[in-house]
Amino acid sequence: MKEGEPIAFPLSTPPRIHDNDAMAIKQLSETLINQIAAGEVIERPASAAKELIENALDAGATRIEIATASGGKALLRVTDNGSGMAETDLELAVRRHCTSKISETLDDIRTLGFRGEALPSIGSVAKLSIASRRAGAAGGAEIAVAGGKVLFLRPAAANTGTIVEVRDLFFATPARLKFLKTEKAEAAAITEVVKRMAIAFPRVRFVLSGSDRSTLEFPATGDDHLARMAQILGADFKDNAIALDAEREDVSLTGFAGVPTFNRGNSAHQYAFVNGRPVQDKLILSAIRGAYAETIPAGRYPIAVLSLTLDPALVDVNVHPAKSDVRFRDPGLVRGLIVGAVREALAREGDRAATTGADGMLRAFTPGRSGFQQGWRPAPAPTTWAAETSPSRPYEKAATAGYGFAERPQAAFEGLAIPTARAEVAPPAEPIRAEEPARFPLGAARAQLHENYIVAQTENGLVIVDQHAAHERLVFEAMRKALHSKRLSSQVLLIPEIIDLPEEDCDRLIAFADELGELGLAIERFGPGAVAVRETPAMLGEVDAQGLVRQLADEIAEWDTASGLAAKLEYVAATMACHGSVRSGRRLRPEEMNALLRQMEATPGSGQCNHGRPTYIELKLSDIERLFGRS
């Protein structure tokens, strides 16, 4: 190639020239049509299990048994006691688009299956056999299909109901086998399918067994949906679930939402159903995330079981052959219903601590675990205790020793009913009356540990409160309430604070100066690489303006300025609240601690901080007695 000569890149290979006969349009064979369809309908063994279980439920089964081997690749057998099929039904059942569930329209689908694709698709890629008998029939019938070809159709002995057996899945399309996961992963996927179906149909008994798993049984619970959910999600779910029951226009929502502090490390414990159909719809999952915003820590997920009921004409279940996605005619209405119902439930009952918190504490003190080693003995009690304090005056020692704390303007607690005083030594505390613990859900303050944790006595146990996390939530809720009603009051700094920042961060902050001003934070440009803070939210009192502004700049950069800060003002309020809360390490007076407890009881969402961590843990008296072996 000569210097300066342009480089010639080869063109893509031109299409082959076909003769007219080769290019003629042909009708594909029935077997090939079914194999193509199977690529969408039957993606893995779990897909086949889902289709067969749906057929059993549509047939009115009350007992369904599923058996697997090699993760469902070698064997998948579904046995039910449903209505069964006659010999003529079996012949049609393995033909494409033959179904008993719809006739002329897709506007009124009230069954799980309706496309008539599952059995012929399975039969085209596996070895399929079906034995069935209708109730009251003298005998049953059996049909076998392998690689899309019917092997036989004959009378057979069978119990009332149907047995569908799938062997050597994808033997006719071996390339598909390469895309399957390990046997353990495929078996787990089938288990998840069974769990979803079991939650949707509590009146049905499910049994899952096989050589690749231990037997899993879900007895029927009748109309007790929560009992069935406890079988799937664990017994703790019953104690940490809030009932949902809401309706908007023609859509109703029922189910249960877990308290925010009862969460998991992934979203696998979120179940959604539309007209009884298990779905994995992005709109619903997004609505759940939005409903729990600011109440769940990053990387954690709430537990929820939601059931939507609406006119079948208002939802399209025919979006995909797998039928796991749906499309609502009014998605905004559905999302608003879910978010509103869950938030209302959390505001009503979501402040309580998860019962698993106490269990975790008890496990931490179990002999043989970290924190409680064999041979451990408690340190001897101080000999001066009796002289220094008494149970009747729990604050006497602390009061005489002094409750020194950093000065903080009264504005920092404005509207929060938490008294403050500019004093280095607190006056002697009044004894707390014995009846106080019974009067309040969070009890009466008894002590402060490590200048961060408040210990309160309740009527039947004790509560340990993280003072910083709790007050952070109270400040945030006060800011959010004010934000939706008026511009927050601010305090003018005597000397504006100049904060050096990268120029792009300054640009982002100034672009949203008006929105920040609504929250009481007044900033303006101060040269190319700095901003001046002239006012801060009065509610926060003394605040680290530099740390606050830098964190806000980072958050706005993460959100992307194009998305608009106006829609995220509550997140900004949460950031500000964190900077303006009672800090860890601050000593509190008895009245301050009790005021904090009372305000927590009156504030929605106070059971967790803005980052989703619990603000308190409750130990029942029975839990304490277990620690000492008294129960």
Image: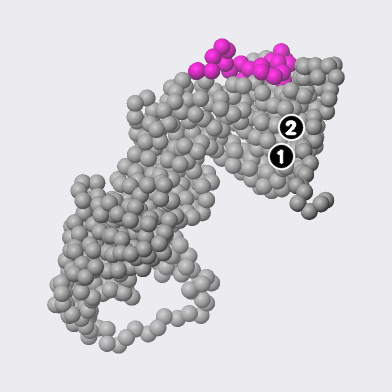
The answer to whether marks 1 and 2 mark residues whose Cβ atoms lie closer than 8 Å is yes
Read off the residue under disc 1.
72
Task: Look at the image and give the residue range highlighted in magenta.
Answer: 83-108
Query: Residue 594, position in %: x, y?
Result: 21, 64
Distance (Cα) linking label 1 and label 2: 8 Å
* Colour mode of the rendering: one colour
x and y percent of residue 482 in the render?
22, 51
- Residue 87 painted magenta: yes
Instruction: Indicate left or right for 252 with 190 as reference.
Output: left
Frontmost residue, 155 versus 27: 27
Q: Is residue 230 visible?
A: yes
Which residue in the protein does label 2 denote?
166
Secondary structure that dominates the magenta span:
loop
Report the front residue among 57 and 367. Answer: 57
Image x and y of residue 71, in percent: 71, 43
Answer above or below: position of 548 versus 226: below
